[in-house]
Image: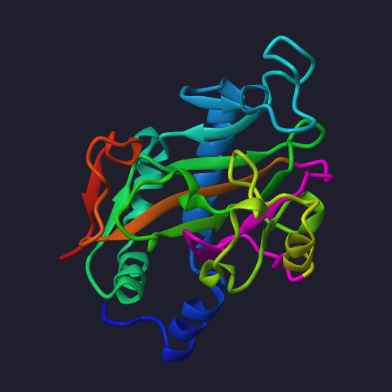
Amino acid sequence: MQNPLSPAQVDSFRKEGYLLLKGLVPTAQREQMLAVTQDHLRRAVAPLEYEAEVGYEGAPSSLEAEGGRTARRLRAAWQRDPVYRQWASDPKLVAILHQLFGEPACITLAHHNCVMTKHPTFGTATGWHRDIRYWSFPRNELISVWLALGAEAPGNGALKFIPGSHLLQLQPEQMDELDFLRPEVPANQALFAQGIAPSLEPGDVVLFHSGLFHAAGRNDSEQVKCSVVFAYHGRSNPPVPGTRSAASDDIQLDT
């Protein structure tokens, strides 16, 4: 499958740092992933990450506190069930990534490789950050692929992006010790004002650059929001040996 994206789509990704692909995943495939996700959440199938373990503002204080067993993500999606592997290695998706990288695509299982969940009440907001902050690759040229298993909008904690922010050169004082943008810095406030939150329908997919600043709010709805997320890189940009990024399998998906 050669060059499934139009030149305009490729140009938009280069400039804006993200690309929304409407209805990319067929309904049956999406519903199968959602059913597995809901089952694994119900049975708390390990490995999971809990909101209490992350400790963002508003999270339960411990696993024993009220809401302490609120899952933030189902880890190891690739290893968890074949339905996720089928999506992560889908030939059309792989062809899209090959086109954007300009070379064969690889999936890193060290990062993302999960189903993100955002629960009402105890699901916390995530500040403005970029994924490359804790990834170790020679070049900041990875792509995260976010699949909405249900509808996503500002009211249930949808992703927000600052378009073009992957091209910015920031000053050290703009970032805190965890590499989040500091909200009190005037230059950052100007960036926040540029943020957008595209609404996603079930089966929509967003690709975004590893250097793009993104965030997400709380879930004020009554339903759990679920999204499958994987990260990819080009063949010539492997993880740096000896780092966390090289600690898990790295799989080439095409030739």
Q: Which residues are magenta?
A: 194-223
x and y, in percent, of residue 66 in the image: 79, 16
* Residue at x 53%, y 29% (from the top left corner): 40
x and y, in percent, of residue 156 in the image: 77, 50
x and y, in percent, of residue 103 in the image: 23, 71
Q: Quadrant of residue 119?
A: top right
In the displayed structure, does residue 93 sit left or right of residue 198? Answer: left
Q: Quadrant of residue 41?
A: top right
Q: Is residue 21 above or below residue 12?
A: above
Q: For the C terminus, give its image quadrant.
A: bottom left
x and y, in percent, of residue 2 in the image: 26, 81
Instruction: Evaluate whether residue 97 shows in this view.
Output: yes
Residue 203 part of the magenta segment: yes
Is most of the magenta stretch helix, strand or loop? Answer: loop
In the displayed structure, does residue 116 sit left or right of residue 87? Answer: right
Q: Residue furthest left?
A: 255
Q: Residue furthest top?
A: 64
Q: Residue furthest bottom?
A: 7
Q: Is residue 140 above or below residue 226?
A: below
Choose between 143 and 42: the one closer to the eye: 143
* Residue at x 38%, y 37% (from the top left corner): 81
* Residue at x 43%, y 82% (from the top left corner): 10
Residue 109 part of the magenta segment: no
Choose between 161 and 3: the one closer to the eye: 161
Instruction: Evaluate whether residue 32 shows in this view.
Output: no
Q: For the N terminus, give its image quadrant.
A: bottom left
